[in-house]
């Protein structure tokens, strides 16, 4: 007796989709690192990201029994992010079903269709990480956040200097001095960027700045299958989705991916529309990308040489 579509759905949900999710998040080092520390949430009207910086005037030196200021003057304690939704179809026409008769054949065909959905979701997520805000349906990406003049997380950066990232839009030629200056601007005490990301051209520019003796790679990044060089002992990696001309200085301690726990690559069973000879399943994701301390992030965004 051939497999029913309920059985195919169950096999896909249990065996194929988990592998798809692994493949999606192993496709770029940024997705891989975000997945490793993702924080599923149970719901809420918005995703609230507690901030690692808040101002208060109720502080100061005092002496003896002097009256202390108890006013709560913290202006902002959290940023707010709307949930963003993503889906991909898995479709099987009756024609394809007949051409792939037999349990093994139809399961292999379903795997190939899931692979298409995997590539689609991977591209959508990896591209969304760098969203400028021009597409309001996408997650709020790095190109929106790493600014001094945008509204990110519901907070206007022009109104609060502590909510600004470090941005250099004037340097056109990549130099070690420019990189060191940005690295230092993003740091304080023991906190400095722990991941540098650019496209292949940016990586090649950095490679050419180094002597052969300086071209040390990161074992941590290499173990994940990603080539890397080191800058101040920090991995510099290639992300093909990074915008051309941009070099990102990221602190992964302050960036989080928040999927909804009930919509984290949830698969709906195969169904047949009333007006098509096809069976459809859908995979859904809902979540948000949020940064809590923009001062620890930097961007060289005008590099051409």
Image (cartoon, rainbow, N blue to C red):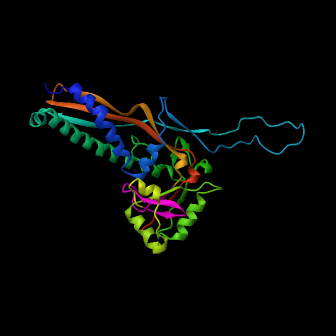
Q: Position of residue 76 (x, y in %)?
A: 62, 39
Indicate whether 189 appears above or below 277. Answer: below
> In front: 53, or 212?
212
Q: Residue at x 88, y 38 (%)?
A: 66
Q: Nearer the viewer, residue 245 or 52?
A: 52
- Please count the marks in the image: 0
Q: Quadrant of the N terminus?
A: top left
Query: In the picture, which quadrant includes the C terminus?
Result: bottom left
Q: Is residue 289 above or below residue 101?
A: below
| Residue 279 found in image quarter | top left
Based on the picture, tell me whether residue 29 belongs to the magenta stretch.
no
**Residue 87 in view in this figure:** no
Q: Residue at x 17, y 24 (%)?
A: 274
Query: How far across and down, in percent of the image, does residue 38 sit?
Result: 47, 40
Q: Quadrant of residue 181?
A: bottom right
Q: Is residue 52 visible?
A: yes
Question: Residue, x 50% and y 49% (percent of image)?
Answer: 145
| Range of magenta residues | 228-249
State left or right for residue 282 relative to residue 214: left
In the rendering, at what x and y percent does residue 260 appear?
Answer: 44, 33
Instruction: Check the image and report above or below for 4 versus 185.
Output: above
Could you say where residue 43 lies in the image, as x and y percent from the top left?
Answer: 47, 29
Question: Does residue 63 appear left or right of residue 81 in this picture?
Answer: right
In the image, 214: left or right of 70? left
- Picture quadrant where residue 97 is located: top left
Q: Residue extending furthest bottom?
A: 211
Query: Residue 230 magenta-drawn?
Result: yes
């Amino acid at each position: 007796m051939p497999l029913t579509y309920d059985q195919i759905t169950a096999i896909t949900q249990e065996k194929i989709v988990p592998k798809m999710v692994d493949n999606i998040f192993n496709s770029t080092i940024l997705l891989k690192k975000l997945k490793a520390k993702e924080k599923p949430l149970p719901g809420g009207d918005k995703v609230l990201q507690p901030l690692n910086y808040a101002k208060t005037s109720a502080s100061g030196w005092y002496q003896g029994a002097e009256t202390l200021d108890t006013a709560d003057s913290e202006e902002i304690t959290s940023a707010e992010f709307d949930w963003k939704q993503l889906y991909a179809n898995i479709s099987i026409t009756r024609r394809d079903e007949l051409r792939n008769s037999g349990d093994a054949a139809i399961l292999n065909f379903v795997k190939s269709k899931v692979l298409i959905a995997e590539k689609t979701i991977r591209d959508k997520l990896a591209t969304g990480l760098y969203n400028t805000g021009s597409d309001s349906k996408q997650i709020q990406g790095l190109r929106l956040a790493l600014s001094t003049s945008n509204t990110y997380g519901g907070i206007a950066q022009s109104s609060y200097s502590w909510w600004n990232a470090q941005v250099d839009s004037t340097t056109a030629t990549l130099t070690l001095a420019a990189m060191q200056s940005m690295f230092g601007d993003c740091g304080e005490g023991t906190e400095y960027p722990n991941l540098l990301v650019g496209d292949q051209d940016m990586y090649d520019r950095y490679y050419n700045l180094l002597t052969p003796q300086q071209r040390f790679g990161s074992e941590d990044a290499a173990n994940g299958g990603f080539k890397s060089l080191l800058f101040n002992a920090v991995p510099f990696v290639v992300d093909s989705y990074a915008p051309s001309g941009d070099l990102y200085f990221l602190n992964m301690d302050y960036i989080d991916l928040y999927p909804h726990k009930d919509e984290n690559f949830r698969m709906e069973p195969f169904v047949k529309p009333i007006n098509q000879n096809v069976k459809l399943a859908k995979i859904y994701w809902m979540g948000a990308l949020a940064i809590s301390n923009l001062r620890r992030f930097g961007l060289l965004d005008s590099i051409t040489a």
